[in-house]
Amino acid sequence: MSFFLGLFSLLMIVIGAMFIYRPAFMAGNVKLYADEPGFHVLAAVGRILLGLAFMVHASQAHLSGLVGFLGLVMFLAGVFLLVISHEKFSALVTLMVDRYGQYARGAGIFLAVVGAVLFYAVAL
């Protein structure tokens, strides 16, 4: 489980770096796939599964409180995304990219830092 969560943390760092390096490209790709039903399902189910994995592994992590809390937040976000309709999901993603797209670099920095902290917490 540590290996999988460590890989996910490294993926967060890579995606964060991509948002820092090419924010318009990344935001455009997110908006491009917002209308795809598979993207909605992947976003919801992925968050639920990752949230459960982080909550289960939290007791073995260096920063167990943080890992458990982030797992709970991921799980609840996944449940929320599962409950809303696909039209509302698409509208939410489009709104977020349109309204907050100029902050993509800042979001990338945040994502990379959180990924690094999670990597330390679960993989080292």
Image (spheres, grey):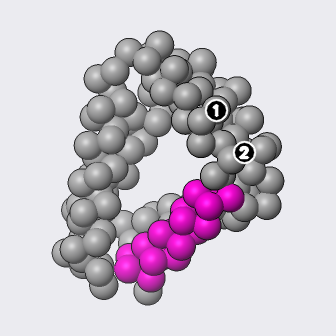
Q: Is residue 120 magenta?
A: yes
* Residue in the picture at 36% in, 30% down: 81
Question: Viewer-proximal residue, 42 or 33?
Answer: 33
Kind of element beneath mark 2: helix
Residue type, label 2: Met
Whether residue 13 sits left or right of residue 71 in the image: it is: right
- The answer to whether residue 38 is magenta is no
Q: Quadrant of residue 55?
A: bottom left
The residue wearing badge 2 is 26
The answer to whether marks 1 and 2 mark residues whose Cβ atoms lie closer than 8 Å is: no
Spatial distance from mark 1 to mark 2, Cα to Cα?
13 Å
Q: Position of residue 95 (x, y in %)?
A: 55, 28
Residue 9 rendering spot, x and y as whole percentages: 51, 67
Q: Which residue is mark 1?
A: 98
Above/below status of 120 relative to 17: below
- Report the residue at 34% width, 38% height from top: 78
Query: Badge 2: few (under 14), some or many (20 or more) residues near its Cα, within 10 Å?
Result: many
Q: What kind of element bears circle 1?
A: helix
Q: Is residue 85 above or below residue 72?
A: above
Q: In this image, 100 relative to 105: left or right? A: left
| Magenta extent | 105-123
Image coordinates of residue 113 in percent, x first then y, are 53, 73
